[in-house]
Amino acid sequence: MHQTAKLLIEVGALLLLLGLLGRLSRRFGLSPIPLYLLAGLAFGHGGLLPLNASEEFFAVGAEIGVILLLVMLGLEYSANELVGNLRSAAPAGLIDAALNALPGFAFAMLLGWGWVAGVVLAGITWVSSSGVIAKVLGDLGRVGNRETPVILSVLVIEDLAMALYLPLVTALLAGVGLVKGGVALGVAVLTVVVVLVVAIRYGHLISAALSAKDPEALLLGVLGLTLLVAGLAAELQVSAAVGAFLVGIALSGPVAHHATELLSPLRDLFAAVFFVFFGLVTDPKDMPPVLLPALALAVVTMATKLLTGYLAARRVGIAEPGRWRAGLALMPRGEFSIVIAGLAVAAAHPVDPRLAALATAYVLITVVTGPMLARLPDFAWFKAWLRRRAVASRPPTPVPTGD
């Protein structure tokens, strides 16, 4: 009973603190993720007041948080929309991977951490935060903008790429060898293809089995299906998060709409737990030595994300202001970067222990500065600068000559 009481006190106090931090961040128009990470650092290993009784609770809650983040993202798309986006945005996805994964790999090699750590850091710098970006687009009233489908297409390609990347990096971290790693990747590809085919051809049957008229039954059904598929995906060495994303893709119509409303509060709760847990297992003493490298990496990869969005928007004919909005919106990293770093820390053959601290500092920098920089196109001076650029780039008007 004493242990249970201690667990309730620790969980209750930390959740109350997260609520206050979330309210504070929204008052200043910022993402609450950095504050959640800082709270985890303050009360985790090496923090001001380590929480011992509740660590297991937050570990399980963190897994559920990742699953809910991804199923909610999947609910935003139908299977046909997903396939259409993949076809139209594939070149932008390749540019995105090249511009943003290679700097992470090169950085790890420069630090002398080895090629496995390089593969891990490549994933951390590659994938933008779908959750943070979706919130920024909503807060700035840009959901209906012409460049928003371009942004979402890049995010979807990244999330699907994770279905292949995560099993591969898990195999590398486990040291299972090339053959077993290839088998794990093959199983992952097959699983994703099968689930996509089921979602496209039979998604309406899955939605029909879940009644949108009964909120309680719908909540339990969608949550149960999501956790079940996520668990099976994890057993197949795919990723629980990717499995959850594909469940969201399979659901459509009124079921998807009502499920989004019902799951939103749960997602917010467990997503906060997820970010706190990563802070809990990171020792703050490890962060000062990697702060400058994290800042340098953030500057480079935020610039490459800006270039990614700019080129992707230009490719489909978006005007100059929309290109800048697309590039600036893609800067924040978040949930997947933390997931990848968490895999590296918990692996049987862990990489350099400084990688988790570097990832935490890196995510903190990008999720604080990214949403701020996304507001730049709304300022008058930025609009005036774009107008001057447009005027300067126009060809000179030919002077008429008289005969």
Image: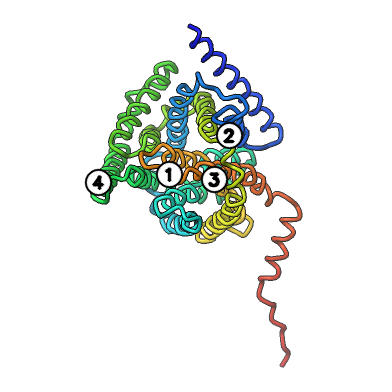
**Separation (CA) of disc 2 from disc 3:** 13 Å
Q: Residue furthest top?
A: 1
Q: Are marks 2 and 4 in contact (CB under 8 Å)?
A: no
Name the element at disc 3: helix
Q: Quadrant of residue 247?
A: top left
Q: Which residue is mark 3?
A: 358
Using a 10 Å C-alpha cutoff, classify the residue at mark 3 as few (fewer than 14 neighbours), some (14 to 19) or many (20 or more). Answer: many
Q: Residue at x 55, y 35 (%)?
A: 283
Q: Which residue is mark 1?
A: 159
Which numbered disc, 1 or 2, marks the residue that appears first in the sequence? 2
Kind of residue indicated by mark 4: Lys
Q: Which residue is mark 4?
A: 180
Q: Are marks 4 and 1 in contact (CB under 8 Å)?
A: no
Using a 10 Å C-alpha cutoff, classify the residue at mark 1 as few (fewer than 14 neighbours), some (14 to 19) or many (20 or more). Answer: many
Q: Quadrant of residue 272?
A: top right
Most foreground residue, 270 or 48: 48
Using a 10 Å C-alpha cutoff, classify the residue at mark 2 as few (fewer than 14 neighbours), some (14 to 19) or many (20 or more). Answer: many
Q: Residue at x 53, y 38 (%)?
A: 131
Which of the two discs, 2 and 3, sits closer to the camera? Answer: 3
Q: Residue at x 53, y 33 (%)?
A: 275
Most foreground residue, 189 or 384: 189
**Separation (CA) of disc 1 from disc 2:** 22 Å
